[in-house]
Amino acid sequence: MTIEDLEKAVAKLPPEQFAEFRAWFEALDAARFDQKIERDAKAGKLDASADKAVEDFRKGHAREL
């Protein structure tokens, strides 16, 4: 199956099934994103950003949201 085949199939879904598909796809996308963040964190790829954020906070360069 190609991307074009998927696009055509999704475009033909009735609204209720499209909403169900969208919810499933959003959950899948979120899970994959979470997995990537977890892998990056374990690999140390986020350490520099975290260190910078802590440094900025300690210098008072943060505000409450």
Image (tube, helix red, strand yellow):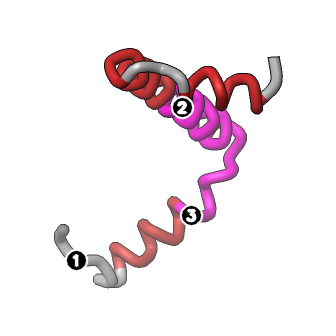
Look at 18% across and 68% down and name the residue there: 65
Q: Tell me residue 22's x, y (percent).
A: 43, 27
Q: Earlier in the sequence, mark 2 or mark 1?
A: 2
Q: CA distance from mark 1 to mark 3?
A: 17 Å
Report the span colored magenta: 28-49
Q: CA distance from mark 3 to mark 2?
A: 23 Å
Residue name at image x 66 percent, y 34 percent: 39
* Badge 2: residue crowd in 10 Å (few <14, some 14–19, many ≥20): few
| Residue type, numbered disc 3 | Ser
Kind of residue indicated by mark 1:
Arg
Q: Mark number for residue 29?
A: 2
Specify whether 56 is left or right of 11: left
Say what amino acid the circle numbered 2 marks. Asp
Could you say where residue 7 lies in the image, as x and y percent from the top left?
Answer: 65, 31
Question: Residue 63, labelled with which disc?
Answer: 1
Residue 49 rendering spot, x and y as whole percentages:
56, 64
Mark 3 secondary-structure assignment:
helix
As helix, strand or loop, the secondary structure at mark 1 comes to loop
Q: Mark 2 or mark 1, which is nearer to you?
A: 2
Q: Main secondary structure of the magenta part?
A: helix
| Residue to which mark 3 is pinned | 49
- Left or right of 19 on screen, residue 24: right
Q: Residue 41 appears in which quarter of the rendering?
A: top right
Q: Earlier in the sequence, mark 3 or mark 2?
A: 2
Residue 26 location in percent, x, y? 45, 30
- Helix, strand or loop at label 2? It is helix
The residue carrying pointer 3 sits among few (fewer than 14), some (14 to 19) or many (20 or more) residues within 10 Å by Cα, namely few
The correct choice, above or below, for 48 with respect to 13 in the image is: below
Does the stretch in magenta take in 42? yes
